[in-house]
Image: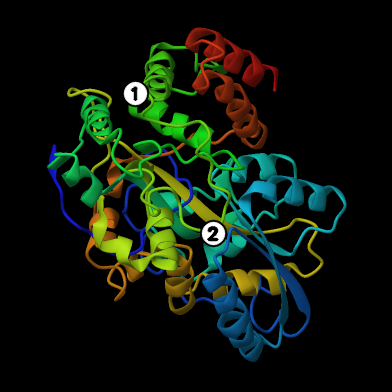
């Protein structure tokens, strides 16, 4: 096990590509040549009004966008921006409905698994030429930038990187006699068993269940740690040895009372770990940011460990999720929208945007930002252990469907094998 170390600061991300490698794109991509007419230059985009849909912003980020980013953009370009916000739970419906009715915001935040589904449905504008001509292209970590691509075309630019590993309440573990952070699933179970029954603990493990697809994301991380492959010969492969191992482990935590299926985060207030009701979860900046907003004293009680191994012989693995900004294909102001994307993703603006998203910056030239220190810098430097769900045009449907099928399994009403068979059947039917 790794020794407990108190680590303070904000982490974060959204979804990545197979391993998040931190190699930056070639510096100066796009050079200094002037962009062709209509490619989103400031001159072509002067004036006008666009809308921006920010998904899952904290109140701090919402205030920052309204009070700092949007006024600065208006001053620089003459373009007005109407800010719209939505929680992640209702965002899928809002985006798809908006696209169908041609009322989708000009610029929108999209989550980690969203690029392929939205691009495949023709919702997003192809910005390949704009990205290639962008002088800042070379400042982004290559694979984080690639997360906004699908079928060889660029559709989005990363703004926030969320790497999720094991996060722990150091004070609760130490009170239970646990002196080291887990490095394997077995050690994770041992720590949870030691914590079970302590005063105030509802369940030692919080799997991040929420009103969206938190349960599917927890299973996905375990599945990837077990070496699972989503697709084999074009078919779903969840009903596999890796799937049985991952879901079996997840269900075991509920069977032993180490997790509680009724521990569901409503989207506001302190998370169970911050409230002292749980001691361990797979998370990152979202949890640390929640502590900073709701009970700052908890920050010094948090410890973040390495990506867990399914067993001693496995590779350590954490999960990566990249939030990005894209332009709606039906935008009537694509050049103005591109100007806003560039402005939001610029070095000066993106530092605060990533930080307020409780995330790490996807630009290599922000690796030395003042707030990227201590834990943040360590997480950024070890992000090569992070993997993500592979892109698929049906992922927006797959996530909620898998979540629904997992819920009976964690409540013990449907078995592991039956659940995995149902998941494969449902995914294949999509």
Give the quadrant of residue 375. Answer: bottom left
Give left or right: position of 342 versus 358. Answer: right
- Residue 68 lies, in percent from the top left, at 56, 84
Residue, disc 1: 226
Q: Nearer the viewer, residue 57 or 100?
A: 57
Q: In the orientation shown, which residue stands out farthest toward the front?
A: 199
Q: Residues within 10 Å of mark 2 (few under 14, many from 20)?
A: many
Q: Which mark is residue 255?
A: none
Q: Nearer the viewer, residue 103 or 154?
A: 103
State the residue at coordinates (18%, 22%).
313
Residue, disc 2: 157
In the image, residue 22 above or below residue 218: below
Q: In the orientation shown, which residue stands out farthest toward the right?
A: 101
Secondary-structure class at tag 2 = strand
In the image, residue 183 above or below residue 9: above
Give left or right: position of 194 versus 365. Answer: left
Give left or right: position of 108 versus 310. Answer: right
Give the quadrant of residue 78. Answer: bottom right
- Residue 369 lies, in percent from the top left, at 31, 74
Rendered-image quadrant of the C terminus: top right
State the residue at coordinates (56%, 14%).
413
Tell me if residue 105 can be seen.
yes
State the residue at coordinates (34%, 23%).
226
- Residue 181 lies, in percent from the top left, at 18, 41
Give left or right: position of 252 versus 3. Answer: right
Secondary-structure class at tag 1 = loop
- Residue 187 lies, in percent from the top left, at 20, 29
Q: Nearer the viewer, residue 193 or 124?
A: 193
């Amino acid at each position: 096990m790794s020794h407990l170390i108190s680590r303070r600061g904000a982490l974060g991300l959204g979804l990545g590509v197979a391993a998040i490698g931190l190699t930056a794109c070639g510096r100066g991509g796009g050079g200094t040549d002037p962009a062709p007419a209509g490619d989103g230059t400031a001159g072509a985009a002067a004036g006008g009004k666009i809308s921006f849909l920010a998904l899952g912003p904290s109140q701090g980020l919402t205030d920052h966008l309204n009070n700092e980013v949007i006024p600065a953009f208006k001053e620089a370009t003459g373009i007005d921006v109407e800010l719209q916000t939505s929680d992640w739970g209702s965002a899928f419906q809002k985006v798809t409905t908006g696209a169908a009715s041609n009322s989708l915001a000009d610029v929108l935040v999209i989550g980690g698994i969203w690029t392929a589904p939205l691009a495949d449905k023709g919702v997003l504008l192809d910005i390949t030429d704009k990205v290639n001509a962008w002088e800042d292209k070379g400042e982004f970590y290559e694979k984080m930038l690639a997360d906004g691509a699908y079928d060889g075309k660029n559709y989005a630019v990363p703004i926030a990187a969320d790497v999720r590993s094991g996060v722990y309440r150091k004070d609760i573990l130490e009170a239970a006699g646990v002196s080291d952070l887990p490095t394997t699933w077995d050690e994770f179970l041992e720590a949870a068993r030691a914590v079970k029954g302590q005063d105030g603990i509802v369940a030692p493990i919080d799997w991040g269940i929420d009103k969206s697809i938190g349960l599917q994301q927890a299973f996905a991380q375990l599945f990837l740690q077990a070496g699972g492959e989503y697709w084999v010969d074009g078919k779903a492969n969840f009903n596999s040895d890796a799937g049985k191992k991952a879901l079996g482990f997840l269900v075991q935590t509920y069977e032993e009372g180490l997790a509680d299926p009724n521990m569901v985060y409503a989207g506001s207030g302190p998370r169970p770990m911050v409230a002292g009701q749980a001691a361990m979860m797979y998370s990152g900046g979202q949890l640390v940011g929640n502590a900073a907003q709701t009970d700052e004293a908890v920050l010094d009680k948090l410890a973040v460990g390495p990506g867990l191994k399914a067993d001693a012989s496995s590779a350590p693995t954490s999960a990566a999720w990249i939030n990005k900004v894209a332009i709606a294909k039906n935008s009537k102001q694509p050049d103005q929208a591109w100007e806003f994307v560039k402005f939001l993703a610029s070095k000066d603006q993106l530092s605060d945007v990533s930080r307020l998203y409780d995330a790490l910056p996807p630009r290599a030239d922000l690796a030395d930002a003042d707030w990227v220190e201590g834990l943040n810098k360590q997480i950024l430097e070890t992000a090569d252990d992070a993997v993500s769900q592979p892109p698929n045009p049906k992922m927006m449907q797959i996530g909620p469907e898998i979540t629904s099928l997992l819920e009976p399994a964690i409540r013990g009403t449907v078995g592991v094998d039956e659940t995995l068979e149902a998941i494969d059947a449902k995914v294949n039917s999509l």
